[in-house]
């Protein structure tokens, strides 16, 4: 109804669409950023430079809006009110579409040596395929459409020997291809890639599918087909007896049994691991704190859906129930892990696996595991307090404070020779010899929660955090190296750090993200890992490292607004989806040749007959 300008008005705009957009169903989205609650950057300058405009057209004196704005349209004193609208229209091509002549088509026999993102590319993203060939001279390449016509051509750039894979590779840059459709990359004398798409959207269902993994891995309750993407994997509860797990011989001999019911099984077995769980829980909770609109209530179709709280929070809360149970009743350090005394068979029955409950124990303690208990429970408590669930949050915060008190001042690394069946017997060891980063990351979460709830310990946690040599730093993070998790939380969550500290955090995040970009540019395949920094070897579980580094790119985009970071996230996914030395998509169900032989005992049991 007119807004600040008075009565109802009509506005007309003309837009020039990019070349090549046409079709029977084209979705246009309209996004209108208001200046009702704050002034977007440049808004006041615009009106100051146009004194002839009526003063009623805008509201001076508002606070400045601070991007980035939430996609939900939520408004505040620094977020403007935003309106969205969509229209589905039909757009006709301005002229018949005729492929640009690029010469005779190369033979397009399928070749394992021509590698692309097997799902596809966004229209205006960087698009680089990799061709494996010993030639030291450039090789001609073509992009052929579904009918075999050549729509783009060029010659490769010779990269040479890729140290990480041992392959001699060429790169074919076909970024200029931006017409929607299905295509193949064809190398002269070598052959064709799998077919890929140029599309307006690539992975719309992948976030939901990835999150379903956590429900699939719940232990302690029946897994129901109605909550699974693939109902074949429904089962009765795994290890319901985890509500009473004894300590392994050699430690905690006077302790009560551990209540560990409510967990996610590890990827490859049915053990539960404190430090490994902590980084998974942090990743999902950090997503919730950065983007509260992600995976809201009802979006994941889990048993808790419809309770009024974000599904991602409910899922982490269930999977993390066991974490506070890892604290022994004698007041000592937390158990590092709990699992069977011998490895489970790879094809199992639920009854057979549960029969191993009598040879299942909580293994010896460690300082990193105890700090992990503090981190997970402090972060969960912070979010539940913000949801008004004080009673549950009190339990979590009490566990966090208890764990912190037990861990602080100790320096005990996990040893498989103490209170366990032996090194990597029945479960992985997840050793962690560096403890300073665990202290720092735990101090970050304790500080942020204490600040949010007005706890009297806030200054103590803050002083310990700021005195750490890891303060504001960010390096590769994973289950064993958690400096980055602490620093990213300091960016994501409101706090009272000085502007200098906040600037240091942002600068370090962007610097690390730039190193990730450089890794992609310098490798033969678009891996962002810079494997030389790992002693010339890919680390175990390297794809998790690669995806974590993509998170750093996303943070850098949030800090700078520079879309190149988004482009490098897409290039990271190119690697995951097929532009790699294995010539497979590492995501099940995505791509022509996708990974199927999953290192997952229940998935293997149900699905191994379909493996290629």
Image: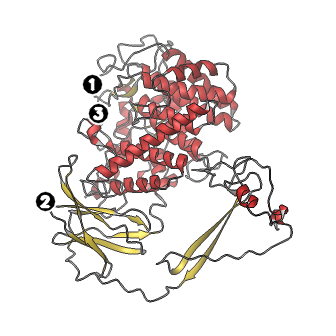
Q: Element at badge 1?
A: loop
Give how far across and how far down residue 336 sits, in percent.
40, 24
Residue at the image position 80 percent from the left and 49 percent from the top: 61
Q: Would you say 479 lies left or right of 505 here?
A: left
Specify few, some or many for label 3: CA neighbours under 10 Å numbering under 14, 14-19, or 20 or more. Answer: some
Can residue 245 be seen at all in this image of the molecule?
A: no
According to the picture, the residue beneath numbered tag 1 turns out to be 423
The foreground one among 349 and 500 is 500
Q: Is residue 80 above or below residue 15?
A: above
Location of the N terminus (image quadrant): bottom right
* Distance Cα–Cα, label 3 vs label 2: 43 Å
Disc nearest the viewer among 3 and 2? 2
According to the picture, the residue beneath numbered tag 2 turns out to be 134
Residue at the image position 54 percent from the left and 78 percent from the top: 25
Give how far across and how far down residue 128 sits, in percent.
32, 62
Specify few, some or many for label 1: CA neighbours under 10 Å numbering under 14, 14-19, or 20 or more. Answer: few
- Dot 2 or dot 1, earlier in sequence: 2
- Dot 3 or dot 1, earlier in sequence: 3
Can residue 54 be seen at all in this image of the molecule?
A: yes
According to the picture, the residue beneath numbered tag 3 turns out to be 343
Q: Element at badge 3?
A: loop
Q: Residue furthest bottom?
A: 96
């Amino acid at each position: 109804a007119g807004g600040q300008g008075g009565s109802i008005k009509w506005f007309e705009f003309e837009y020039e669409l990019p070349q090549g957009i046409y079709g029977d169903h084209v979705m246009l989205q309209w996004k209108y950023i208001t200046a009702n609650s704050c002034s977007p950057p440049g808004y006041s300058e615009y009106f100051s430079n146009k004194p002839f405009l009526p003063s009623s057209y805008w509201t001076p004196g508002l606070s400045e809006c601070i991007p980035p704005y939430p996609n939900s349209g939520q408004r505040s004193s620094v977020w403007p009110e935003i309106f969205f609208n969509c229209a589905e229209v039909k757009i006709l091509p301005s002229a018949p579409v005729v492929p640009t002549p690029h010469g005779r088509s190369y033979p397009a026999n399928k070749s394992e040596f021509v590698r692309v993102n097997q799902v596809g590319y966004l229209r205006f993203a960087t698009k680089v395929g990799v061709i494996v060939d010993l030639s030291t001279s450039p090789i001609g390449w073509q992009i052929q459409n579904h009918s075999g016509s050549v729509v783009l051509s060029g010659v490769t750039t010779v990269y040479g020997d890729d140290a990480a894979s041992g392959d001699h590779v060429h790169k074919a840059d076909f970024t200029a291809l931006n017409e929607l459709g299905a295509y193949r990359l064809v190398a002269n004398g070598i052959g064709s890639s799998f077919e890929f798409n140029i599309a307006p959207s690539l992975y719309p269902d992948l976030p939901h599918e990835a999150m379903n993994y956590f429900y699939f891995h719940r232990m302690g309750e029946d897994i129901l087909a109605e909550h699974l993407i693939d109902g074949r994997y429904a089962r009765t509860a795994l290890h319901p007896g985890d509500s009473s797990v004894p300590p392994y011989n050699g430690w905690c001999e006077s302790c009560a049994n551990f209540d560990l019911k409510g967990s996610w099984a590890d990827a490859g077995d049915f053990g539960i691991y404190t430090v490994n769980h902590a980084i998974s829980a942090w990743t999902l909770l950090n997503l919730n704190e950065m983007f509260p609109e992600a995976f809201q209530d009802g979006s994941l179709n889990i048993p808790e859906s419809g309770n009024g709280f974000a599904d991602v929070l409910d899922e982490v809360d269930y999977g993390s129930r066991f974490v506070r149970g890892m604290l022994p009743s004698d007041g000592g350090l937390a158990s590092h892990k709990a699992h069977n005394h011998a490895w489970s068979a790879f094809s199992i029955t639920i009854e057979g696996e549960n029969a191993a409950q009598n040879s299942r124990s909580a293994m010896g303690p460690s300082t990193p595991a105890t700090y992990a208990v503090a981190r997970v429970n402090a972060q969960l408590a912070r979010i539940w307090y913000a949801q008004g669930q004080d009673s549950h949050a009190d339990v979590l915060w009490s566990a966090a404070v208890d764990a912190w008190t037990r861990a602080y001042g100790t320096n005990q690394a996990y040893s498989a020779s103490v209170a366990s069946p032996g090194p990597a017997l029945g479960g992985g060891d997840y050793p962690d010899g560096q403890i300073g980063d665990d202290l720092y990351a735990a101090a970050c979460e304790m500080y942020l929660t204490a600040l949010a709830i007005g706890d009297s310990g806030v200054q103590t946690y803050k002083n310990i955090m700021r005195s750490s040599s890891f303060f504001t730093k960010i390096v590769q993070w994973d289950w064993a190296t958690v400096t980055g998790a602490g620093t990213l939380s300091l960016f994501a969550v409101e706090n009272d750090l000085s502007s200098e500290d906040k600037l240091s955090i942002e600068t370090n995040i962007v610097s690390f993200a730039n190193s990730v970009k450089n890794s992609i540019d310098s490798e033969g395949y678009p891996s962002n890992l810079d494997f030389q920094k790992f002693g010339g070897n890919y680390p175990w579980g390297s794809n998790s490292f690669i995806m974590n580094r993509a998170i750093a790119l996303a943070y850098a985009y949030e800090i700078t607004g520079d879309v190149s970071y988004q482009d490098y996230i897409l290039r990271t996914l190119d690697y995951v989806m097929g532009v790699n030395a294995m010539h497979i998509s590492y995501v099940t169900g995505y791509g022509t040749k996708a990974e199927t032989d999953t290192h997952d005992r229940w998935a293997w049991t149900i699905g191994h007959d379909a493996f290629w």
